[in-house]
Amino acid sequence: MAEEQNLTFWDHLEDLRWMLIRTIAAVFVFAIVGFIAMPYLYEEYVMGPTTSDFFLYKYLCIITSRIPFIPDFCDDNFNVEIVNINLASQFFRHMTTSFWFALIMTFPYLAYEIWKFINPALYANEKSKVRTAFIFGTGMFFLGCILGYTVIFPVTFRFLSTYQLSPDIKNQISLDSYMDNFLMLIFIMGVMFELPLASWLASKLGLLTRAFFRKYRRHAVIVLLFVSALITPSGDPFTLMIVFFPLYILYELSYFLVEPEQPIEEEETEDEDTGLSLDKI
């Protein structure tokens, strides 16, 4: 049974208040660290996809040089200059990016605080499952963010920055435009990688079974293609597939994590009269 703490509503509210205070304090500390380190992070990582030295481009060059009709990543002279067109953009981007950095860094701690808050209300057999779910969800979130940074954003950025409607049109990419797409794609992939965890939780609540995933697999392919097209506005099949395949793998992983449907056992009704024996008088 769940631990009986004999706590009142106000005691729980006090625990929640201190949990929020500790979490906000952690975000604040990491935001300060991020603010100090942000010039280095921008130079080494955030602006990495803007030049041909980015590590992913070298591997994609091997692929694209052999397959036609996909973007060319073999141009060693690729270099996109990011410009600032608003006076205060660099300062505000410094502040906001430090905040997002702090949110990512404190995500495991936030999961721990939530786990510690709900832990007393859980039964003994539920604690290990919920703890595993928090660890799994945290790992999947970071995996999605890493995939967004190392694959999804660079491929999308490379295609869009080199696409030309006319040779007379020169691309000038602003800092705000670059960072909006950078943060959006990375965080969207982090959130999308929570799909298996969300499916597992829905299964535990009795809302999902494997039958749902089998029944709507073809529909899911269409939906995932549509979501992939929204995530990658470039529209080329190569970039679309790079986003689609990880999402489809997540769909299949969700299938194996949810509970299988329970077989319906037919109740055998037995005629009461057949089980009776008449005593002869």
Image: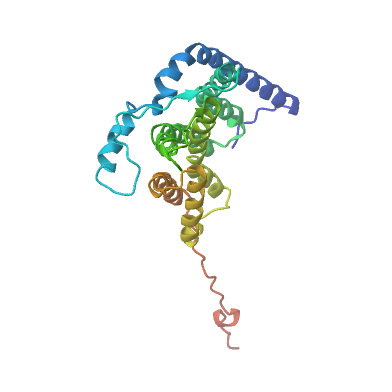
Q: Nearer the viewer, residue 12 or 223?
A: 223
Is residue 256 positioned above or below 82 on the image? below
Quarter of the picture containing the C terminus is bottom right
Task: Name the residue located 29 percent from the left edge and 49 percent from the top edge.
Answer: 68
State the residue lying farthest toward the front.
168
Q: Position of residue 155 (x, y in %)?
A: 40, 37
Residue 41 horizontal side relative to residue 65, left or right? right
Task: Name the residue located 58 percent from the left edge and 48 percent from the top edge.
Answer: 205
Q: Nearer the viewer, residue 160 or 108?
A: 160
Residue 192 horizontal side relative to residue 79, left or right? right
Is residue 259 positioned above or below 129 on the image? below
State the residue lying farthest toward the top.
36
Q: Position of residue 224 (x, y in %)?
A: 48, 51
Q: Position of residue 181 (x, y in %)?
A: 51, 33
Q: Nearer the viewer, residue 188 or 199?
A: 188
State the residue lying farthest toward the bottom.
281
Q: Position of residue 36 (x, y in %)?
A: 50, 11
Task: Name the residue located 60 percent from the left edge and 31 percent from the top edge.
Answer: 118
Task: Name the residue located 33 percent from the left edge and 32 percent from the top edge.
Answer: 56
